[in-house]
Image (cartoon, coloured by chain):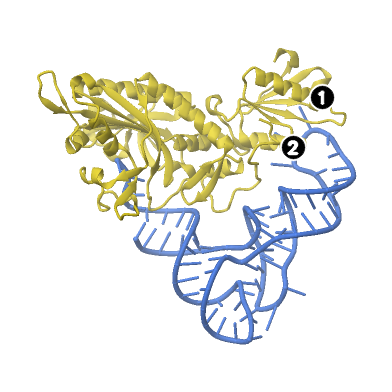
Chain colours: A yellow, B blue
RNA sequence: CGGGGCGUAGUAUAGUGGUAGUAUACACGUUUCGGGUGCGUGAGGUCCGAGUUCGAUUCUCGGCGCCCCGACCA
């Protein structure tokens, strides 16, 4: 991609009404656009990063036998009345609207109910189980107060996977596989070292659920971390019994502020019973399906990375999710030799399948460098009259600032 | 949902009851060419409505919107 053609450009200052670091940086760098409070559009750079995060999640969900679908945002109220989640007194962040014929519909804030209804058409026997189904879906939550940039929006993308098993035992096995997949996801997107499997409230069907909490001051949760075991306990459930369960002592725990980037939850038979998702077991008797739900917000992941992988100059993307692999910067000279050489290198890298953002703009060196720092592509290749003199390319690592000079012919 | 603050060009900011200023971004010219180069020219603005007033961007009220603190967050 030639930067001269790129839709979006950087700006020096963030809008004054944007306080969170993630939104400030992402807006300045041209990744996102704010539509209204808590509602953001993703522009080319932001969408590239988002799609890479989605790609990683998709691979890991497929690796645990997840099958991708795509459901609807519009929701039939009767499905939610069956589980007592339609009433505004019970769920206070619905977006509801009406069809022309007057019937009420909602914009989904999660998808347990509609998916359970779908599954009823395809699960009748123990032979039809287990199943795991997931989607990337826009969720709508009418938050009282949107804040923290893209980390807590009113409309946001969510990967939600739901598992369907015959019994508790097979469910637990699957749940554990999902947990391991989640750990791999956060490792791969570059949040592994700050992300803790966190014990949290389990609801009526299991003692605990697990949250994936990433340490950052931008978060809203408080957790107690056990560094060496790499686990944590959400403040909401911290008590003597929990400590005993986990074999931990309060003195080994450190209080941290964190953001919930993912969570996995055993649902038991709450939804299958309420909505009638039963199967016939080996003895010919009907039994409710045992379910679990597993969520990750790709946008929240992106916002979290923007928060903790950035410095005063801008963003610093981990390689796996950077919008481009290489930022090629040409510092043009008068006779056009640098441009010719940079054009050639750009073509060469493209042919190798490397994703390159090529700054071919007629701009000063300082401007290009500043923009490059702000956008945060991991590696910067610089070509100038200076490097041309000895047929080299200067390579600078965005994260470490380390510079090396390599022969152009070796690339 | 309780409390507080704020709406002036694309962005960031001054200022005023009487022709709205600066920076940046933008266009043109020129200059410069390894860390947002300098100069010149140009275009671009008072959230909406009502009230007070000879006159409102300024004061009052309402609306809309944004932000912060708290509560909430399945």
Residue A165 rendering spot, x and y as whole percentages: 23, 24
The reply to whether label 2 and label 1 mark residues of one chain is yes
- Judging by the rendered image, the residue that carries numbered circle 2 is A366
Instruction: Pinpoint the chain carrying mark 2.
Output: A
Horizontal placement of A287 versus B5: left or right?
left
Q: CA distance from mark 2 to mark 1?
A: 16 Å
**Depth check, front residue: A61 or B16:** A61
Identified at 71% across, 13% down, the residue is A410
Q: Residues within 10 Å of mark 2 (few under 14, many from 20)?
A: few
Element marked by disc 2: helix
Instruction: Pinpoint the chain carrying mark 1.
Output: A
**Depth check, front residue: A169 or A43:** A43
Element marked by disc 1: helix
- Judging by the rendered image, the residue that carries numbered circle 1 is A386
Residue A252 rendering spot, x and y as whole percentages: 34, 29
Q: Is residue A151 above or below residue A144?
A: above
Q: Is residue A392 visible?
A: yes
Horizontal placement of A376 versus B27: left or right?
left
């Amino acid at each position: 991609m030639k930067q001269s053609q790129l839709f979006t450009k950087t700006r020096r200052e963030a809008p004054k009404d944007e306080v969170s670091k993630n939104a400030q940086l992402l807006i300045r760098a041209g990744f996102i656009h704010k539509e209204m409070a808590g509602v953001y559009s993703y522009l080319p750079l932001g969408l590239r990063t988002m799609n890479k995060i989605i790609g990683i999640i998709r691979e890991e969900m497929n690796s645990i036998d997840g099958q991708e679908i795509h459901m609807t945002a519009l929701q039939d109220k009767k499905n939610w009345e069956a589980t007592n989640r339609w009433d505004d007194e019970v769920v206070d962040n619905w977006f509801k609207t009406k069809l022309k014929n007057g019937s009420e519909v909602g914009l989904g804030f999660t998808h347990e109910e509609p998916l359970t209804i779908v599954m009823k058409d395809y699960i009748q026997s123990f032979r039809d189980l287990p199943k795991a189904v997931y989607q990337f879906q826009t969720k709508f939550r009418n938050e009282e107060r949107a804040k923290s940039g893209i980390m807590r929006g009113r409309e946001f993308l969510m990967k939600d996977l739901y598992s369907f098993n015959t019994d508790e035992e097979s469910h637990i096995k699957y749940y554990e596989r999902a947990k391991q997949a989640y750990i791999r996801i956060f490792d791969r997107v570059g949040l592994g070292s700050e992300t803790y499997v966190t014990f949290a409230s389990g609801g009526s069907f299991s003692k605990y659920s697990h949250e994936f909490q990433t340490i950052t001051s931008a978060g809203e949760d408080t957790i107690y971390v056990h560094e060496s075991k790499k686990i944590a306990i959400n403040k909401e459930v911290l008590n003597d019994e929990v400590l005993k369960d986990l074999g931990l002592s309060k003195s080994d725990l450190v209080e941290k502020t964190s953001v919930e980037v993912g969570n996995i939850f055993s649902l038991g038979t709450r939804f299958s019973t309420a909505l009638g998702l039963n199967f016939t077991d080996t003895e010919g008797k009907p039994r409710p399906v045992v379910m679990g739900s597993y969520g990750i917000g790709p946008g929240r992941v992106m916002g979290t990375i923007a928060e903790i992988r950035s410095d005063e100059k801008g963003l610093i993307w981990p390689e796996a999710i950077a919008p481009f692999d290489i930022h090629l910067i040409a510092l043009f000279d008068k006779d056009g030799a640098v441009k010719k050489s940079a054009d050639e290198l750009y073509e060469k890298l493209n042919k190798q399948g490397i994703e390159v953002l090529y700054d071919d703009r007629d701009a000063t060196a300082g401007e290009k460098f500043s923009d490059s720092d702000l956008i945060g592509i991991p590696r910067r290749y610089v070509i100038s009259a200076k490097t041309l003199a000895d047929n080299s390319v200067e390579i600078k690592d965005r994260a470490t600032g380390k510079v090396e000079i390599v022969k152009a012919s070796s690339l």
